[in-house]
Amino acid sequence: MKVRIAPTPSGFIHAGNAVNFILNAALAKSQPDGRILLRIDDIDADRKRPEYVEDIFRALDWLGIEWDEGPQSPDDFERHWSQHRRVGLYEAFLQKLMDNNVVFPCQKSRKELTAQGAIYPEAWKKQPISLRDPDTAWRANTPPELPLSCFVVRRRDGLPAYQVASICDDVHFGITDMYRGDDLRASSAAQRWLAGAAGETNFERVRIYHHPLLTGTDGTKLSKSAGAGSVRDLGDDKVVKSTLLQISAKWLGLPHENIQNLPDLVGLIHKGSFTIKKEGLL
């Protein structure tokens, strides 16, 4: 088993992120050959800040999570592990999509697209432009049943979009299992379809599971963009830390009342049985 902890440095790590990190780490460490990759998804450099990158390492240290592969510090990340150092992989994938006639050009604005709702208009797939024109996004020509309609695979600035970078990295680093939040179900479906459309058969072997989301007091999911509280504000609060571990155990169907640290959770996984389904992690 090889999992990845893949935060985006677009905000400070909140409790929902922390539980996802715990689940990935505990399930990998419960296997004799389990490995953890730390992959920081920084392809969207516009939202990246040095303090957000530093906070990822601080949060992992606070949780007691050690990883087997990936950057060991913010400086090591920038020098050797940034996604911008793997752009060649992503561009080769995009070329496959173009060769397979999977993509079309789009110059519509975000405002125009929002006004159309969730379904990309069929008529817009025939804009009088080419894939090589400046300021042109590439969109995937998705089937009607896919939950993400004609999503972007190459941005207007020429950079590969998230779905492409994520697929390529998972294949490149040999990820076998992916534990993600329920809010990424549509993204998982999009990635499965896109990898197949590019002929990337290795991605079919990645097992994808989804877990519930932590929510705020108002019932909405915790979000960096919405200013969800950061674990950096918790200090050395052992009660909060054990609560996050207990939530992870509860989602795995394990007894959770006395868990205080990550080894406790790993030990419970060794002793007990937990429920994992292809559709989700419960």
Image (spheres, rainbow, N blue to C red):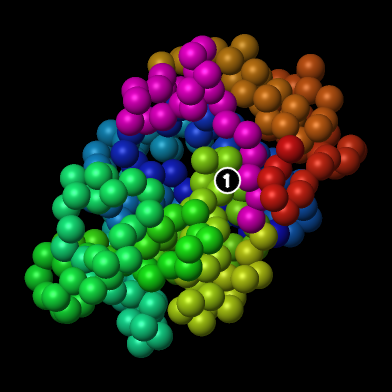
**Overall secondary structure of the magenta section:** loop
Q: In front: 207, or 24?
A: 207
- Residue 170 picture location, percent across and down: 52, 64
The residue beneath circle 1 is 180
Q: Is residue 39 visible?
A: yes
**Residue drawn at x 33%, y 58% as measured from the top left:** 120
Splitting the image into 4 quarters, where does residue 54 fall? top left
Say above or below: 64 vs 110: above
In this view, the residue farthest toward the left is: 134
- Residue 100 picture location, percent across and down: 40, 85
**Residue drawn at x 16%, y 67% as measured from the top left:** 136
- 212 in magenta: yes
Amino acid residing under circle 1: Arg
Q: Quadrant of the N terminus?
A: bottom right
Say above or below: 95 vs 47: below
Q: Report whether 192 appears left or right of 41.
A: right
Q: Report whether 268 appears left or right of 99.
A: right
Q: Report whether 86 appears left or right of 15.
A: left
- Residue 209 picture location, percent across and down: 66, 50
**Residue drawn at x 41%, y 58% as measured from the top left:** 149
In this view, the residue farthest toward the front is: 123
Q: Is residue 92 visible?
A: no
What stretch of residues is rendered in magenta?
A: 208-232
**Residue drawn at x 78%, y 55% as measured from the top left:** 32
- 60 in magenta: no
